[in-house]
Image: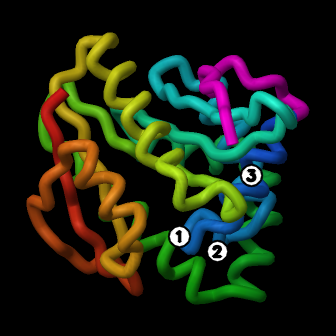
Amino acid sequence: MSHILHPLGQIPPNLIPRIAEIHMGDAGLLSKLGYPFVLRYFENAVKDKRAFGFYAQGVETGEILGFSLASPEPSLLTSKLTEDKGWFIRNIFKVVLTRPMAFFQMVISSVTIRGQMYEPNTIECVYFTVDPKSRGQGLGRTLQRALMDEGRRRGYKKIYASVETWNVASLKATQANGFKIIKTFREGIYFRHRLESEL
C-alpha cells in the first residue's frame, strides 16, 4: 500500500486516538498500563516541542498505518503523565488493582529510563509501531529512518534505541538502519537490546 509520511506534531487531534489504538498492539509497558495512559502519552508527545516523529497515512484510504517518535529526553515524556495529579491517581489506582505487575514494571522502568541517555546531542527512538495489517512491507524501517534523517537535520549526532530481545522484526529493521547492539540488559520483566547509531 502506498503511503505518505507526515510530521507527528502536525497530526489533527481527532487522529491521535488512532495512534493510541495502533500502539495498543505493542507488547510494551505503556500498552500494559492501558488505553488511557497510551492516549494521554501521545497527546502530550505531539505537543512537546523537543520530541518529534512521523505518521504514515495510506494514500488511497487515508488510514493511519504506523508512526514513529523520538525525543532527546524520553523520561520527560513519561513524567508528563503525572502532571494532572487527579487523573494520574485515578488511573494508576485502577492499574494497581487490575494489573499490579504493570505498576511494578512502571516503577522499575521509570528508574531505568533516567540513566539511558549517555551524552549530549543524542536522541532516543522511543517508538516505531506499525499496524499489524501493514507489517512486513518495510514501513517500520521507513518510519525509523525518517526519525534519523530529522534528528540529523536538527543537529543531533547519535540515536539510541531499546528493543525487546524477542522482537525480531523490530530488531532487524533497526539493524538494517545501521544500529549496532551495544549491550543486552534486563529491565524488570523485559530483556532488551540497547542499540546506537551515528547520525
- Are the residues at dot 2 and dot 1 in contact (C-beta closer than 8 Å)? yes
Q: Secondary structure at mark 2?
A: helix
- Which amino acid type is shown beneath numbered disc 1? Gly
* Image point (24%, 68%), residue name: 193
Residue 187 drawn in magenta:
no
> Where is residue 71 shown, x and y percent of the image?
41, 34
> Where is residue 66 shown, x and y percent of the image?
64, 46
- Category of crowding for the residue at label 2, using alpha-carbon neighbours closer than 10 angstroms: few (below 14), some (14–19), many (at least 20): many
Q: Give me the C-alpha separation between circle 3 and circle 1.
A: 13 Å
Disc 2 designates what residue? 32
Residue 59 falls in image quadrant: top right
**Foreground: 65 or 36?**
65
Residue 99 falls in image quadrant: bottom right
Residue 6 drawn in magenta:
yes
Q: Secondary structure at mark 3?
A: helix
Q: Is 109 placed left or right of 18 in the picture? A: left
* Image point (76%, 49%), residue name: 39
- Which amino acid type is shown beneath numbered disc 3? Ala
Q: Secondary structure at mark 1?
A: loop
**What's the magenta region?**
1-14
Outermost residue to the right? 14
Disc 3 designates what residue? 20
Disc 1 designates what residue? 28
